[in-house]
């Protein structure tokens, strides 16, 4: 699959806040550079997700901070947070991702709920199930296997950990019980290697992007 890789003096951002955002934990401030693979929402999907978010925030009277519309995504694999940006790690990850051979697929997120966490605001997320996320989970499995094969070290589990595909819309202390929502549906045409520096602003820096095979649509 064709891909694009860039390794600039990258910039990215934290969620946009409706009130002052809490300071990150000391251990996170010591490792402010994040590399991860994700499926970014295309502009039309991001617009629909933002409209849904406004309705859900009002419905549940959520307070906290929203994820910038241009940053809405579903994480595939995190390469962890680091003290410094590593071009070598980014290049290794890009080479591994180039070996992923997957068809394009449809995505459907039709539930809203809060994820629990030990401290801080809870992610308020859209999730899906069954056929709605089957293509995403297949891509996740293929990418994990490609990364593990390229660098079979303890950094990667031998088998892919179980994940819950989700798109985080908002962070809030409120605990919202799972409930159905109007489905957010779109076709996933590719995935990206993204960079985020803690505390910066704007869209994620796209270091690499890979298109999925449209001739084998799933």
Image: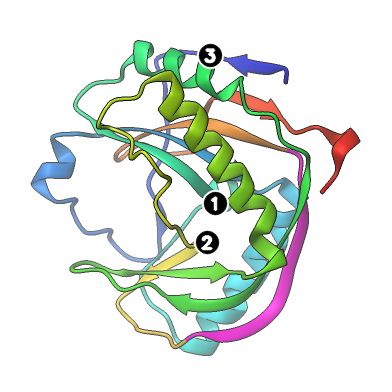
At x 85% / y 44%, what residue is drawn?
217
Numbered range of the magenta stretch: 178-189
The answer to the question of whether label 2 and label 1 lie on touching residues, with beta carbons closer than 8 A, is: yes
At x 58% / y 37%, what residue is drawn?
142
Q: Quadrant of residue 174?
A: bottom left
Colour scheme shown? rainbow
At x 90% / y 34%, what residue is drawn?
215
Q: Earlier in the sequence, mark 2 or mark 1?
A: 1
Which numbered mark, 2 or 3, is in the foreground of this view? Answer: 2
Q: CA distance from mark 3 to mark 1?
A: 21 Å
Q: Give the secondary structure at mark 1.
A: strand
Q: Residue under label 2, please give it.
A: 166
Q: Could you say where residue 128 lies in the image, as x and y percent from the top left?
A: 61, 69
The answer to the question of whether label 2 and label 3 lie on touching residues, with beta carbons closer than 8 A, is: no
Q: Residue under label 3, please give it.
A: 6
Q: Looking at this view, is 138 or 115 the one in front?
A: 138
Q: Earlier in the sequence, mark 2 or mark 3?
A: 3
Whether residue 46 can be seen here: no
Label ID, residue 74: 1
Q: CA distance from mark 2 to mark 3?
A: 27 Å
Q: Give the secondary structure at mark 2.
A: strand
């Amino acid at each position: 699959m064709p891909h694009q890789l860039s390794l600039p003096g990258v910039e990215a951002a934290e969620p946009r806040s409706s009130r002052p955002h809490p300071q990150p934990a000391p251990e996170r401030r010591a490792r402010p550079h994040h590399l991860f693979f994700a499926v970014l929402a295309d502009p039309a999907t991001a617009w629909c997700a933002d409209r849904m978010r406004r309705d859900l925030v009002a419905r549940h009277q959520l307070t906290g901070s929203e994820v910038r519309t241009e940053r809405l995504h579903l994480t595939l694999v995190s390469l962890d947070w680091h003290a410094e940006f590593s071009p070598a790690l980014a290049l290794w990850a890009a080479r591994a991702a180039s070996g992923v051979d997957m068809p394009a697929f449809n995505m459907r997120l039709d539930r809203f709920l809060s994820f629990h966490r030990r401290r801080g605001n809870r992610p308020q997320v859209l999730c899906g199930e069954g056929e709605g996320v089957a293509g995403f989970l297949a891509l996740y499995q293929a990418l994990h296997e490609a990364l593990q094969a390229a660098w079979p070290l303890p950094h990667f589990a031998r088998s892919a950990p179980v994940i819950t595909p989700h798109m985080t819309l908002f962070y809030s202390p409120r605990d919202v019980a799972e409930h159905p929502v109007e489905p957010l549906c779109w076709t996933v045409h590719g995935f990206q290697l993204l960079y985020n520096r803690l505390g910066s602003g704007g869209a994620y820096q796209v270091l690499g992007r890979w298109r999925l095979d449209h001739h084998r649509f799933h």
